[in-house]
Image (cartoon, helix red, strand yellow):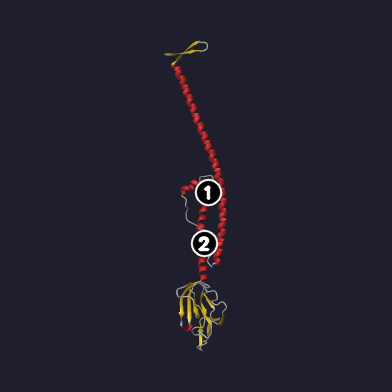
Amino acid sequence: MEKKKLIYINQKTSDVKEFNVSFRFIAAILGVLAVLMIVFIKYSVAFGVNFTQNSQITQLKKENSTLKSELDRIGHSIADIRSSIDVIEDKDDLIRSMLDLPPIASDIRQVGIGGTNRSIASELELGELSFGNELIENLNILEKIEREVRLEKASYQKLLTTVERQQDSLRYLPCIKPVERGYISSAFGNRRHPILKRMHFHRGLDLAATRGTPILAPADGFVVSAGKNGGYGNYVKINHKYGFETCYGHLNKIYVRKGQFVRRGDKIGEVGSTGLSTSSHLHYEVL
C-alpha cells in the first residue's frame, strides 16, 4: 500500500523529522473525526431543542397560572353581576306593581334555551384543559346573564313606555278647578230649572263667580268648539284625549278658537251670564 511521507521541521532548532503515514490511517483519522463531529452536532441539537422546549413549557405554565387566576377573578365578577341582576329583577317587580303591571313569571326569568351556542368540538377542546370545566361553566353563566339582560332591557322599555303614557295621560286629565275661587251654586243631577221652572237633569256643575273672572283649561287638549251654542250662550268645548272632554257655558268672553291647542292653566275665557242664565256663573261639564 502506498504510503505518504510527512516532514516536520522545527523552526528553532532546524531539526527535520520524517513520518510515514498510510492512506488507510488518514482515512481512519478522518472517519473518527467525522463521527465525533456528528455526535457533537446531534447532542448540541438535542440540547438546544430540550432547552427551547423547557423554556416554552415554563412559559406555558406561567401563562396557565395567570389564566387560572384571571378565570377565578372573572368567576367572582360573574357572581357580583348575578347579584346585581337579582336586585334589578326585584326592583323591576316593584315598579311593575306600582304601575299595576303583572310581574314577569319566574319560568320566563329563567330564559332557558335549547342546546348551546358553542359547537360540540369546541366543548370537547375546552374540556381537555385543566380548568376546562370551570371555564365552560362560566361561559354558560355568561350566556344566561346575556339573555337575562336582554329580558330586563325589554322589560325596562315596557316600563318606560307605560310611565310615559301615564305621564301623558295626566297632562290630559281634567284635574284642576276651571274657576279658582268659584263655588258650586248648582250640583250635577236632577233639579228645577231656574228659568223654565220645571224638573230638568243638570249635566254639569254651576260655579258662581263675578263677571270677568278668568276661566282656566283644567288639562291639555284641543278646542273642538268655540262660539254661540243655544242656551249655553258663549260656549267652549275641549277634547283632552284618552276619552275626556270638558264643556264651558255662559261665558262672557272667549279667548280661544276651534282647533287651537291649550295647556293646563291657559286662560280660555271669562265667567259671564250669556244664554239661559239668571246670574254670572260658569256651567262646567266633564264628558
Of the numbered discs in the image, which one, if any, rests on residue 156?
2
Q: Mark 1 touching mark 2, by CB under 8 A? A: no
* Residue appearing at x 56%, y 44% in the figure: 66
Question: Is there any visible trace of residue 242 in the rendered image?
Answer: no
Of the numbered discs in the image, which one, if any, rests on residue 116?
none
Callout 1: helix, strand or loop?
helix
CA distance separating discs 1 and 2:
31 Å
Vertical order, 51 against 108 (above or below): above
* Residue appearing at x 53%, y 38% in the figure: 57
Of the numbered discs in the image, which one, if any, rests on residue 135?
1
* Residue appearing at x 56%, y 59% in the figure: 88
Q: Position of residue 63 (x, y in %)?
A: 54, 42
Depth order, front residue of 161/273: 273
Vertical order, 273 against 98 (above or below): below
Question: Is there any visible trace of residue 26 in the rendered image?
Answer: yes
First in residue order: circle 1 vs circle 2: 1
Q: Position of residue 124 (x, y in %)?
A: 48, 47
Vertical order, 153 against 23 (above or below): below
Report the quarter where the N terminus lies: top left
Q: Position of residue 143 (x, y in %)?
A: 50, 54
Q: Position of residue 72 (x, y in %)?
A: 57, 48
The amino acid type found where label 1 is placed reads Leu
Q: Residues within 10 Å of mark 1 (few under 14, many from 20)?
A: some
The amino acid type found where label 2 is placed reads Tyr
Callout 2: helix, strand or loop?
helix
